[in-house]
């Protein structure tokens, strides 16, 4: 993490190769990022699997799993309607994956030497792909259901005729920006929080080396890190929710048009 | 920023492992387990709705039974009151009849007694009249020396008695009223 006593807050985002793997011209080596993705996937399978007792009166674990599925069910039901039922598996997977990846990235594993949590959702190579998948789904569903009428999405209901040449390009641009905003929002929220914690964490270390004044800074920084960490826990949940919610809203646009 | 610096190097690996992890979640959890969880929830919701409906039906049944019971109770109460009143009336009627019979009996006895009194009085009077006729004959014989026929004496006495009987009759009637 540090080279010659200097702390680099960006180092935590470096992807490190664990086992090299090449298929043709592609380097698909197993990395720390891949490990954390698989861990998230594994934990989700365990979490949902343990709640799959299918009892009439749910235990704690089953109630927790049903809480998550019910939450996503309601989200889709409210925003898309009864037609959204077939998208619930995708929205649920998306929500759970982002939630678990965000929370795993916050595990304080760095206190064990040689280990540190890696936040897979702080890589735009990951959030971007998820956003593109969601956006592609919107476009495919939209054109599949409405054919060329899908373009009426760019003309909001009740737009006066002379305004259409002006409104349609604006709507089109705002539509095309969606995948970028979707992917970047999660990526930026994660990276910003982690940098903030890293920077203030380094303040604690540097402050301890800086005499009485430095000690005060350390104490303040420690309090601040604790506060930011709590905020990040909240952010991890909110960002997962926002990603799922926006995907649902975009799908609703594609299914119900305006 | 490693995300940008490493992008071209790690993108294929990131994509590959993301497809594997997300595919695992999507197919194993989203497609495999989620429908089971949702069906459990909907089965429970249905069961609860069913049970609620059953409970509502049972409650309606109980209310109906209670209403029927209440009605029966009311009817029975009314019947009981009727029977009690009827019994009261019956006993009153019986008492009245018995009193009436007793009264009639008493009346008959009174009438009988009165009849006996009257015959006695009449007998006494005829006897008295006979005596009075004899007395009158004797008195006229001694006073005037005339021998009066018994028939004449009886006629005169009858005329004399007829005159004095009127007020006596009134008096007797009054006593009869008082006896009643």
Image (spheres, coloured by chain):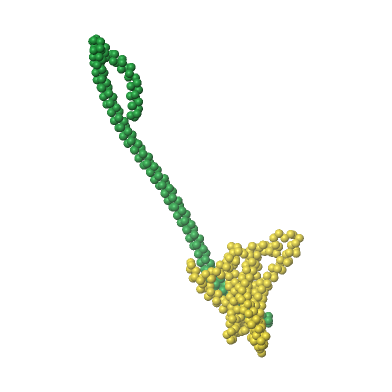
Which quadrant, please, contains the N terminus of chain B?
Answer: bottom right
Q: Quadrant of residue A32?
A: bottom right
Chain B: drawing colour: green
In-image side of B118 versus A56 (left or right): left
Residue shown at 49% from the left, 59% from the top:
B52
Looking at the image, is A121 positioned above or below residue A141?
A: below
Residue B17 showing in the rendered view: no
| Picture quadrant where residue A215 is located | bottom right
Please state the horizontal and vertical placement of residue B87, each as a whole percent of the image: 36, 42
The extreme bottom residue here reads A4
Front-most of residues A69 and A158: A69
Q: Is residue A67 visible?
A: yes
The image quarter containing residue B84 is top left
State the residue at coordinates (26%, 12%): B152
The single residue placed furthest to the right in the displayed view is A162
The image position of residue A84, as x and y in percent, is 60, 65
Chain drawn in yellow? A
- Residue A141, given in percent of the width and then of the height, sits at 63, 66
**Residue lying furthest front in this view?**
B143
Q: Nearer the viewer, residue A141 or B101?
A: B101
Work out whether residue B102 or residue A61 is closer to the camera in this orientation and state it.
B102
- Quarter the C terminus of chain B occupies: top left
Q: Name the residue located 66 percent from the left edge and 83 percent from the top edge.
A: A217
Q: In the image, is residue B160 above or below residue A155? A: above
The answer to whether B55 is drawn above or below residue A198 in the figure is above
Q: Which one is nearer the viewer's eye here, A34 or B149?
A: B149
């Amino acid at each position: 993490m540090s080279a010659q006593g200097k702390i680099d807050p960006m180092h935590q985002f470096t992807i490190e190769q664990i086992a090299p793997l090449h298929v043709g011209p592609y380097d698909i080596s197993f990395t720390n990022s891949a490990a954390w993705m698989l861990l998230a996937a594994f934990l989700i399978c365990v979490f949902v699997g343990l709640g799959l007792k299918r009892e009439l009166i749910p235990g704690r674990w089953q109630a927790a799993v049903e809480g998550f599925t019910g939450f996503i069910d309601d989200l889709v039901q409210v925003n898309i309607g009864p037609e959204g039922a077939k998208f619930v598996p995708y929205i649920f997977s998306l929500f759970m994956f982002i939630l678990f990846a965000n929370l795993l990235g916050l595990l304080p594993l760095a206190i064990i030497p040689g280990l540190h949590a890696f936040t897979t959702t702080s890589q735009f190579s990951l959030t971007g792909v998820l956003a593109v998948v969601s956006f592609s789904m919107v476009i495919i569903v939209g054109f599949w259901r409405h054919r060329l009428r899908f373009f009426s999405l760019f003309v909001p209901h009740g737009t006066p005729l002379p305004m259409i040449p002006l409104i349609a390009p604006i709507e089109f641009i705002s539509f095309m920006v969606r995948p970028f905003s979707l992917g970047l929002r999660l990526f930026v929220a994660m990276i910003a929080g982690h940098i903030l914690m890293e920077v203030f964490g380094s303040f604690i270390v540097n402050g301890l080396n800086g005499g009485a004044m430095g000690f005060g800074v350390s104490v303040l920084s420690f309090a601040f890190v604790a506060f930011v960490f709590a905020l990040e826990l909240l952010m991890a949940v909110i960002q997962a929710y926002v990603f799922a919610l926006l995907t649902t809203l975009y799908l609703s646009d594609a299914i119900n048009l305006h | 920023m490693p995300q940008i610096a490493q992008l071209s190097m790690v993108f294929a690996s990131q994509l590959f492992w993301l497809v594997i992890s997300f595919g695992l979640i999507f197919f194993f959890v989203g497609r495999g387990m989620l429908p089971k969880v949702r069906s459990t929830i909907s089965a429970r919701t249905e069961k609860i709705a069913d049970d609620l409906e059953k409970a509502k039906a049972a409650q309606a049944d109980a209310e109906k039974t209670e209403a029927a019971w209440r009605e029966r109770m009311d009817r029975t109460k009314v019947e009981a009151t009727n029977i009690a009143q009827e019994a009261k009336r019956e006993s009153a009627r019986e008492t009245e009849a018995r009193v009436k019979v007793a009264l009639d009996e008493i009346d008959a006895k009174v009438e009988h007694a009165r009849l006996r009194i009257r015959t006695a009085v009449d007998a006494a009077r005829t006897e008295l009249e006979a005596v009075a006729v004899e007395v009158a004959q004797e008195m006229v014989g001694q006073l005037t020396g005339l021998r009066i026929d018994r028939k004449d004496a009886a006629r005169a006495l009858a005329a004399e008695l007829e005159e004095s009987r009127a007020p006596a009759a009134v008096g007797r009637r009054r006593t009869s009223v008082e006896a009643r």
